[in-house]
Every structure is written in C-alpha cells, then in structure tokens.
Image (cartoon, rainbow, N blue to C red):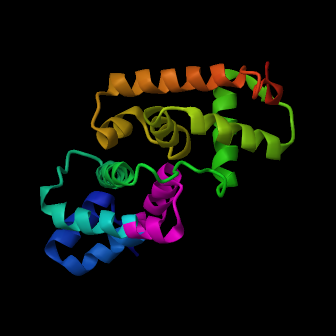
Amino acid sequence: MPEKFSDAELVQKTLKNPDQYALIIDRFEEPILRYIGRITGWSHEEIEELGQMTFIKAYRSLNGFDARLKFSSWLYRIAHNLCVDYLRKNSKKNHMSLDAEDEYSQALIEKIASSDNIVLHLSKDNEKQGVRDIIKILPEKYKTVMILFFIEEKSYEEISDILQIPVNTVWTLLNRAKKQFLALTQEPQFSHLFTYA
C-alpha cells in the first residue's frame, strides 16, 4: 500500500499523522543502514544506532523539510552528517572497511571498470581485495563521492544536496576520485590486478 505514495506524499501524511512515519522508515531503513555501513564499516550495532539517530533527527526536523528538495537526498544528508560527526569523535577507530561487503566491492569494480575501459583479469577474490585496498588509501571525500555515485547511484544533483556542495564540485571530486583510483591501479602493489583495454 505505501508503495503507491510518493516520498513527498508520505512526508505530508506524516505531518498530519505522526504514526505514518513508520511508512517512511519502512521505505528508507534498508538503504540508509546500508549507506551508513559503507561509509563507516562499523559493527551492526553501531550502524543500527546511527540509523536510529538518523530517523529520530529526520522526524524532529520534518517540519523544516524543504519540499523542493528530494526527500531521499535530505535523509541521506542527515545520515551522512551524523556519520561524519561520529567518525570525527571516534577518529582512532578503523572505518571504511569493505571486507564484509563483497557485493559492494564487486559493483564498484564493475562500474569503475566499465566507465574507464579497464579489464580485470585475476580471480574475483583478488579483484575485490585490490579494490578494497585502493579505496582504503583514497581520501575520505573521494571515498564518499564514489560510494554515492557508483554504489548508491545518486545523481550529481542528489550528491550536491547530500554533501551540501555545488554540483560542479561534485563533478570535480568524482573526476579526481576516478583519476586517483585509476592512478593507484598502476602502482606496483596493484598493477598486477588490472589491465587497460
């Protein structure tokens, strides 16, 4: 039943009847938790905690939601900002660990490779490990924009809303992230995993 309503309609329903917020949680809980896991790499409990904080903060701010924006981008921005704050407060903690998410690594490999004519020629395990190792080296701003664009499949405009940066900056960051990623594929520790078409 909730599938027939747009995100904007669900927001309006929730503003009239707070019990309807459960429909928003049902629609967005899985993608938000997945995104939090991808950018933090933390335990299931910590991801759940950040997810709950995201939905609580969104609920409390729902009256201030700008209906001209895409609701999902607004929700991702709340999750992203909470993660950034949490990561800052726990800077000694290891994050961006992709080891537990093979599908994520595989999707990133395929999307970057197809966008830049790279042929991957070793076993899938080696490819995944190579991509994970490269992503761990990238600056956080590049990791985030790559996750949002290649994995979350957000548009430049949505990423702009989520990260609160101009669309041109999104394009620049993504371009630099891909260039740095591709440059790293040619470093001695990784070059045996990749070959160019």
Q: Is residue 46 magenta?
A: yes
- Depth order, front residue of 8/25: 25
197, above or below 106, in the image: above
For the point 51% across and 51% down, the residue is 95
Q: Quadrant of the N terminus?
A: bottom left
Magenta-drawn stretch, dominant element (helix, strand or loop): helix
What percent of the width, then of the height, locates residue 20?
27, 76
The region drawn magenta spans 27-49
Q: Is residue 39 magenta?
A: yes
Which residue reaches farthest front?
92
Residue 3 in view (yes/no): no
112, above or below 94, in the image: above
Asked if residue 24 lies left or right of residue 143, the reply is left
Residue 167 position by quadrant: top left
For the point 70% across and 45% down, the residue is 106
- Depth order, front residue of 4/189: 189
What percent of the width, then of the height, locates residue 69?
24, 45
> How many numbered discs sit on the rendered protein?
0
129, above or below 65, in the image: above
Residue 25 position by quadrant: bottom left
Asked if residue 167 lies left or right of residue 101, the reply is left
Which residue reaches farthest bottom?
19
- Depth order, front residue of 44/153: 44
Asked if residue 58 lies left or right of residue 158, the reply is left
42, above or below 25, in the image: above
